[in-house]
Image (cartoon, rainbow, N blue to C red):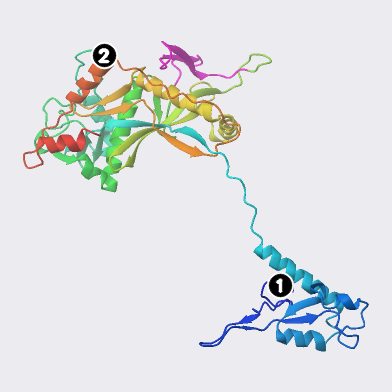
């Protein structure tokens, strides 16, 4: 009993010596632990005059297992190592051994639930295959002059997407998604068509500076696309927002959710006091940060992050020191389901009730699908967060399929003969 409770370790305080001495080659291990009496076996021994029945003196409760060195010390110094001291030493040591050897309680495994995590990402199914650059006489600070000279082609039908003409001026060149070699391109009036350079998108993505330029062109195309929908871009805060159409007058927009023919929503309004119906002296404007992001080597998405813009009179931006508390309070109350509804609203408004929306650049385009990226997970979940999400999408019909096919069919580039043949190009790029 004593040896089992002592765990092969000297019980003397802070000793910790093993009580089995390993033998050298050919020799057996040696047990060096010694059973020391707390109250001596005889009345004449150390601490032997303590009142303890003779029948109890050789039981494990009156014994402490120690190494030879400490056995000698406690018997030579009975005043220092009294009965009370040794009993406490024994109890402390055996408690430590028991705690060290005890198996931790096995907690039951939590019950896992299967859920679908909805992201705020729209997959981009097609992207421009190349960026074109041509000498331009305008500098980086003269973009407004270039905009005045852009020649937008006329649409052939109402179903055909408007052509967008994003561009960048850098180092004496104009960069664009439009094929600048074509005489009728929107920038013909400001570039030299005879000195056009072309760079593959996959090569651009591998260089940090070129990739930033590519993303800038994509994001600028969003500025132009959303402007046609009555949405304005705030460059200072890098977000899109709904302005009022008339100062001091609330604005609503009509859009088409997947499960309804139409719906209307306030997008710029002055909150009212419930008690009096008076305005609170500031305006809310629905806003969002929209940005193209490369998720992997061959996968891009459009991210949607709902926000708010505040103005004092429906037009004048509210000073930053007055915004913090209001926006923080608003976001604290926007749980998953409300946040997701904001994302879905922006998706539905941008797509105008279609299964996808297209940013057209002549014979190149970007196609954004409205089916948001989702992930299936198995986890413990969040107690109380049981709101169901419905990532509903629009049904395809002959018209939407036809529009998609026409848009993709027009996405062709005449690559130089020195480059890979057309079949390899089709495999490498069309999937984007």
Query: Label 1: how many residues lie within 10 Å, few (<14), some (14-19) or many (20+)?
Result: many
Going 33% across and 18% down the picture, which residue do you hit?
354
Kindly indicate whether the residue at mark 2 contacts the one at mark 1 (C-beta within 8 angstroms).
Answer: no
- In the rendered image, residue 263 lying in the magenta stretch gets the answer yes
Let me know if residue 176 is in the magenta part: no
Q: Which residue is mark 2?
A: 399
Q: Position of residue 120 (x, y in %)?
A: 43, 32
Region of the chain picked out in magenta, as a range: 243-272
Q: Position of residue 343 (x, y in %)?
A: 45, 27
Q: Residue at x 22, y 40 (%)?
A: 201
Dot 2 falls on a residue whose secondary structure is: helix
Say which quarter of the image contains residue 32.
bottom right
Expressed as whole percent of the image width and height from the top left, the position of residue 194 reads 8, 36
**Split into 4 quadrants, where in the image is the C terminus?**
top left
Instruction: For residue 390, say whether it is visible.
Output: yes
Q: From the image, which quarter does the N terminus lie in?
A: bottom right
Asked which secondary structure carries label 1, the reply is helix
Magenta stretch secondary structure, dominant? loop
Nearest to the observer: residue 351 or residue 123 = 123
Question: Label 1: which residue?
Answer: 6
| Residue 419 percent coordinates (x, y) | 10, 42
N-terminal label among 1 and 2:
1
Is residue 358 shown left or right of residue 324?
left
Specify the quadrant of the image occupied by residue 202. Answer: top left
């Amino acid at each position: 009993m004593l040896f089992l409770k002592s765990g092969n370790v000297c019980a003397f305080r802070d000793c910790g010596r093993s009580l089995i001495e390993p033998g050298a080659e050919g020799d057996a291990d040696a047990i060096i632990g010694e059973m020391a009496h707390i109250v001596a076996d005889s009345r004449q021994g150390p601490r032997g005059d303590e009142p303890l029945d003779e029948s109890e003196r050789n039981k494990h409760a009156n014994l402490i297992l120690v190494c030879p060195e400490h056995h000698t010390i406690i018997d030579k110094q009975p005043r220092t190592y009294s009965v009370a001291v040794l009993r406490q030493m024994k109890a402390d040591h055996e408690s430590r051994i028991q705690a060290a050897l005890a198996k931790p309680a096995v907690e039951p495994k939590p019950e896992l639930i299967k859920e679908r995590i909805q992201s705020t990402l729209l997959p981009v199914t097609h992207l421009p295959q190349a960026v074109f650059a041509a000498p331009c006489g305008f500098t980086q600070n003269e973009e407004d002059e270039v905009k005045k000279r852009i020649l937008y082609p006329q649409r052939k039908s109402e179903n055909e997407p408007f052509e967008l003409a994003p561009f960048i001026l850098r180092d004496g060149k104009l960069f664009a998604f439009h094929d600048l070699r074509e005489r009728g391109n929107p920038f013909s009036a400001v570039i030299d068509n005879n000195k056009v350079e072309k760079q593959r998108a996959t090569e651009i993505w591998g260089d940090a500076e070129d990739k930033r330029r590519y993303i800038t062109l994509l994001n600028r195309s969003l500025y132009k696309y959303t402007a046609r929908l009555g949405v304005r871009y705030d460059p200072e805060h890098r977000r899109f927002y709904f302005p009022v159409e008339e100062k001091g007058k609330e604005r609503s927009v009509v859009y088409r959710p997947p499960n309804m023919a139409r719906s209307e929503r306030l997008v710029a309004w002055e909150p009212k006091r419930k008690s009096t119906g008076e305005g609170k002296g500031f305006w809310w404007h629905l806003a969002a940060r929209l940005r193209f992001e490369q998720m992997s080597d061959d996968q891009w998405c459009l991210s949607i992050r709902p926000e708010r813009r505040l103005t004092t009179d429906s037009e004048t931006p509210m000073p930053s020191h007055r915004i913090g508390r209001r926006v923080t309070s608003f976001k604290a109350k926007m749980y998953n389901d409300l946040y997701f509804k904001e994302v879905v609203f922006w998706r539905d408004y941008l797509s105008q009730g279609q299964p996808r929306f297209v940013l057209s650049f002549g014979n190149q385009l970007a196609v954004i699908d409205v089916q948001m990226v989702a992930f299936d997970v198995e986890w413990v979940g969040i107690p109380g967060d049981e709101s169901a999400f419905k990532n509903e999408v629009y049904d395809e019909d002959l018209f939407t399929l036809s529009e998609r096919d026409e848009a993709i069919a027009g996405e062709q580039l005449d690559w130089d003969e020195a480059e890979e043949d057309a079949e390899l190009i089709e495999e490498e790029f069309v999937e984007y």
